[in-house]
């Protein structure tokens, strides 16, 4: 593995055979998450592909010329031609391997794969999920000198990292940008010494044995497991939703509202998320229509008051989406009044869906006691029905799902574990 600069790009990349080039930055958590995977893979693939790193901040002109807009970005070159598709953000080991393999003959790939050795490491506690619940548990455990590993399929932060503003997390007078709040939580836990394995594939979880296999070959064992895997947004299930997801249908206002400047959008839902995010989206759009299945909004009163007074927002009560259809630049939402059964078509530039969440428990669904909605049941110390397995945050059965309640659960689980391990 070698570090290059812009002056060396021509010789080291364009005139070379097979190259993987990592544009990285400092103070960049996803770059840190990538570094160990990059180094590890350079040992495996280094005879066939040259592994290069380039510091983006000091080589801005080249980055701009190549259209590199975020760090880290991995580019793949074969005889001077860019190939295999760029990788950016929380880059998984499996994605890099897929791209590297696509540059090599099949028999060589088989030979390299045969050299991959399984590894086993041991910790006191494994935390699955690095949202506020998992990060807080990690912080408390680390401060109690309990050897802890935090594993996440994405980058740390959970839902907070994509929430545009958080105004109800105590300790801050002004509303905090969600990505900043989650960044600070994550850095605090990491600086304490908790080990991070993020942007990984979870191959297998054995709650009884307290074993997690990541990226196929890495087994992590522990004495306790904390499940902090949170929730995923529900889909409406209406035809066209899956096809238009990311192509006009969005589940994240922070991520996508800015692309609807002076446009018209529809929001499906009427709970806290739908109402709060609608208020935010109106910073950009000229008109927003909320489609809500009940005759009243179900969000808290303060949030309701804001949207009801907002002149850009129109609300269709007792209505549900029946289909989403792309027509040119527009998305046509077929909306049915659940009482009258009358259907109408509303054209908009985009649709945001905020209709609740489902718990992320697919890897351990059958083994834990769950409530009727599929959330994990715990006792007051966050213990689940399996000995030594705890669960915290939005994934557990409870009434209120907030950052503060996730943080509280994480604290309780960590303190209970610390006590047990004394
Ligand atoms: C749009 C929106 C706005 C919100 N606004 C606010 C607000 O203003 N104030 C407030 O208090 N709350 C707000 N909330 C709620 C708050 O974000 C959640 O209650 C909180 O993030 C829950 O934390 P958590 O750690 O339980 O889960 P999450 O934040 O969901 O984090 C779960 C983590 O687990 C990871 N994961 C998932 N599956 C696996 C797996 N199999 N293995 C390993 N890792 C996995 C995910 O990648 C994620 O990082 C909002 C939620 C949304 C969706």
Image (spheres, rainbow, N blue to C red):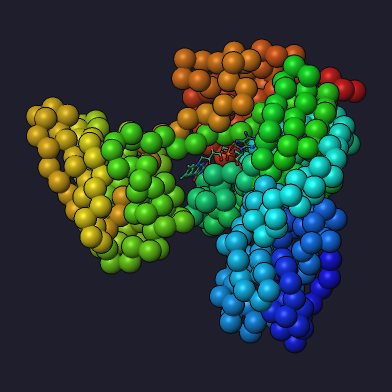
Describe residue 186's horizontal placement relative to residue 36 as left or right.
Answer: left
Describe residue 18's horizontal placement relative to residue 362 as left or right.
Answer: right
Q: Position of residue 325 (x, y in %)?
A: 24, 48
Query: In the picture shown, does residue 314 fall above or below 135?
Result: below
Q: Position of residue 137 (x, y in %)?
A: 73, 35
Question: For the N terminus, which image quadrant?
Answer: bottom right
Please report the residue visible at 41 percent of the width from the left and 52 percent of the height from the top. 246
Q: Where's ligand 1: which quadrant?
A: top right
Query: In the picture shown, does residue 210 fall above or below 99?
Result: above
Query: In the picture shown, does residue 282 fall above or below 276?
Result: below
Question: For the C terminus, which image quadrant?
Answer: top right
Q: Is residue 316 visible?
A: no
Residue 320 appears in which quarter of the rendering?
top left
In the image shown, does 136 or 206 lie closer to the viewer? 206
In the image shown, does 134 or 84 lie closer to the viewer? 84
In the image shown, does 163 or 4 lie closer to the viewer? 4
In the image as oriented, which residue stretches furthest toward the bottom?
A: 7
Please report the residue visible at 54 percent of the width from the left and 57 percent of the height from the top. 177
Q: Position of residue 47 (x, y in %)?
A: 84, 61
Residue 115 appears in which quarter of the rendering?
top right
Q: Position of residue 215 (x, y in %)?
A: 72, 40
């Amino acid at each position: 593995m070698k570090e290059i600069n812009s002056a060396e790009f021509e010789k080291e990349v364009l005139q070379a055979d097979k190259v993987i080039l990592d544009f990285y930055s400092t103070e960049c958590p996803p770059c840190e998450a990538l570094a160990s995977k990059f180094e590890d893979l350079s040992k495996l693939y280094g005879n066939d592909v040259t592994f290069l790193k380039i510091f983006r901040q000091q080589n801005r002109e080249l980055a701009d010329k190549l259209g590199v807009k975020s760090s880290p970005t991995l580019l793949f070159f074969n005889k001077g031609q860019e190939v295999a598709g760029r990788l950016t953000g929380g880059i998984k080991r499996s994605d890099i391997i897929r791209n590297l393999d696509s540059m090599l003959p099949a028999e060589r790939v088989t030979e390299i794969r045969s050299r991959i050795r399984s590894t086993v490491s041991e910790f006191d506690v494994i935390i699955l999920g690095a949202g506020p619940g998992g990060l807080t548990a990690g912080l408390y455990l680390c401060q109690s000198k309990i050897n802890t590993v935090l594993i996440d399929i994405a980058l740390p932060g959970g839902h907070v990292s994509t929430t545009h503003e958080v105004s109800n997390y105590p300790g801050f007078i002004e509303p905090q940008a969600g990505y900043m709040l989650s960044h600070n939580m994550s850095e605090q836990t990491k600086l304490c010494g908790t080990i991070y394995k993020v942007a990984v594939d979870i191959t297998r979880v054995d709650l009884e044995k307290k074993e997690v296999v990541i990226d196929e070959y890495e087994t992590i064992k522990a004495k306790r497991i904390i499940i902090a895997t949170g929730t995923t947004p529900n889909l409406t299930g209406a035809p066209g939703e899956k096809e238009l997801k990311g192509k006009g249908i969005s589940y994240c206002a922070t991520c996508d509202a800015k692309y609807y400047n002076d446009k018209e959008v529809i929001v499906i839902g009427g709970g806290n998320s739908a109402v709060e995010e609608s208020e935010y989206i109106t910073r950009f759009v000229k008109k927003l229509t909320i489609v809500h299945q009940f005759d009243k909004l179900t969000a808290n009163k303060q949030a309701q008051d804001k949207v009801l007074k907002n002149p850009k927002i129109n609300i269709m009560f007792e209505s549900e989406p029946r289909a989403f259809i792309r027509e040119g630049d527009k998305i046509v939402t077929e909306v049915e009044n659940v009482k009258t059964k009358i259907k109408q078509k509303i054209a908009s530039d985009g649709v945001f869906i905020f209709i609740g969440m489902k718990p992320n428990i697919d890897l351990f669904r059958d083994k834990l006691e769950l409530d009727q909605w599929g959330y994990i049941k715990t006792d007051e110390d966050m213990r689940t029905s399996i000995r030594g397995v705890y669960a915290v945050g939005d994934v557990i059965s409870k009434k209120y799902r907030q950052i503060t309640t996730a943080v509280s659960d994480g604290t309780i689980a960590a303190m209970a574990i610390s006590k047990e391990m004394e």
